[in-house]
Amino acid sequence: MNSASTVQGTSAPVDTHIGRRQIVSGLRWIAVLILMIVAIVAVFFYWHYRELYPRTEDAYASSGILHVTTQVSGLVTNVYVQDDERVDEDDPLFDIKSPSYDIALIDARAKFEAALSGAGHTAKTLSSDAIDLDDKAHALDKALKTYSDAKAALSPDQQPFDQLTNARKSWQDALNAFRKTDDAFQKDLGDLAISTPATAKLQAATIQLDKAVNDWFHSHVVAPASGWLSRMTLQPGTLVEMGTPLFAIVKDDQWVVNANFKEIDLARVRLGQKATIRFDMYPDQVFNGIVEGISMASGSAFAMLSPDSATGNWVKVPQRFPVRIKITSPIAPEHSLRVGASAEVTVDTTSYVGQDGNERV
């Protein structure tokens, strides 16, 4: 009796222990199943996200680069800028001096004056234009001298002051006035009717004078666009040849990012889609942009060696296609960009920005 009770009393805890182990094992399998489901769902959503928002780190900042050349040859006399300096469009860069241009201008003026005396009333307009052009040229020289003095008084680490700002404005005004007068001079030259040998002689003399004046004008080399000077090593006394690139100007009015996407990521990428950009130099700053261009050829298509291979040793390599992203965010001075800066680009293929600037989904 006591023996039976003892057996029954010991089997109850054993059954309870086995039951608990089975419950724990079942819960573990349920947890594993739940984790597997969560992982599958996470992988699916990540894959779907990467499909909708393709990303690449093979991206670099770019902007327009202009190579400064001259339209005349000669010795550099004055240099008004230095390397890595920012310039505005039409700011003076340097001057070129050549005695041949001065002699050609004096000779052209003498021949023009001689031709005027034989052309009669037909030459009145051109004579007036030539006098006005000469006045504007002297005003331009005076404005350049004022600008040069103001620039020389500015120390390298000093911010531009009122004197330099006013001198730059005077130079711009004088430059615009000269260009306007020269356009009028060329227009009246084109309207000149060739009816007599005297008017033909006047036309030839006017063309010669206009060329001499323009050669003199181009001896004052100005910035073709606003931006930052790069590789500027020009010094007074350097002999420069017409058409030879001397240094570069990196334009800062419109920045783009050239992003190289894998071909498997391009299925949904379209023009006008929004993009977000992060530069390695500013990891906490996000720039906005839009897709402005998609290349019709991969980067390897322009390689020196053709990627085509007829041999048996062929390995498939995913190709990358350049996508141009226009940066639409304003560029703050503390976040100034540099050509070639590395970036990470993500394209939102669910969005679209029309030509009117309005976003569409």
Image (cartoon, grey):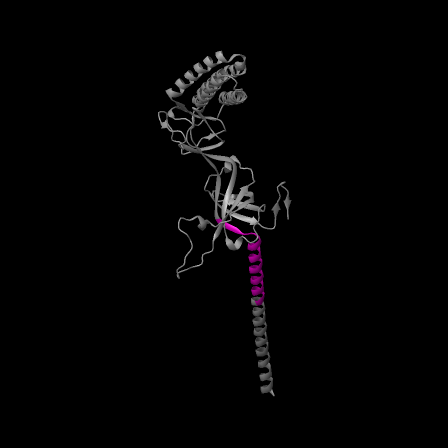
Residue 123 within the segment the image draws in magenta: no
Q: Which residues are magenta?
A: 33-57
Question: Seen from this angle, which residue lies furthest bottom?
Answer: 1
Residue in the image at 45% along x and 13% along y: 114
From the top left corner, tell me how far across and down residue 305 is, in percent.
Answer: 39, 51
Q: Is residue 152 above or below residue 322?
A: above
Is any atom of residue 286 visible in this view? Answer: no
Residue in the image at 51% along x and 41% along y: 256
From the image, which quarter does the N terminus lie in? bottom right
From the top left corner, tell me how far across and down residue 292 is, in percent.
Answer: 55, 44
Q: Is residue 6 above or below residue 299?
A: below
Q: Name the foreground residue: 179 vs 33.
A: 179
From the top left corner, tell me how far across and down residue 138 is, in percent.
Answer: 47, 16
From the top left corner, tell me how far across and down residue 337 is, in percent.
Answer: 49, 38
Residue 50 within the segment the image draws in magenta: yes
Q: How many marks?
A: 0
Q: Quadrant of residue 80?
A: top left
Q: Quadrant of residue 231?
A: top left
Q: Name the foreground residue: 290 vs 116.
A: 116
Is any atom of residue 211 visible in this view? Answer: yes
The secondary structure that dominates the magenta segment is: helix
Q: Name the foreground residue: 313 vs 107.
A: 107
Q: Name the foreground residue: 317 vs 109.
A: 109
Q: Is residue 327 above or below residue 152?
A: below
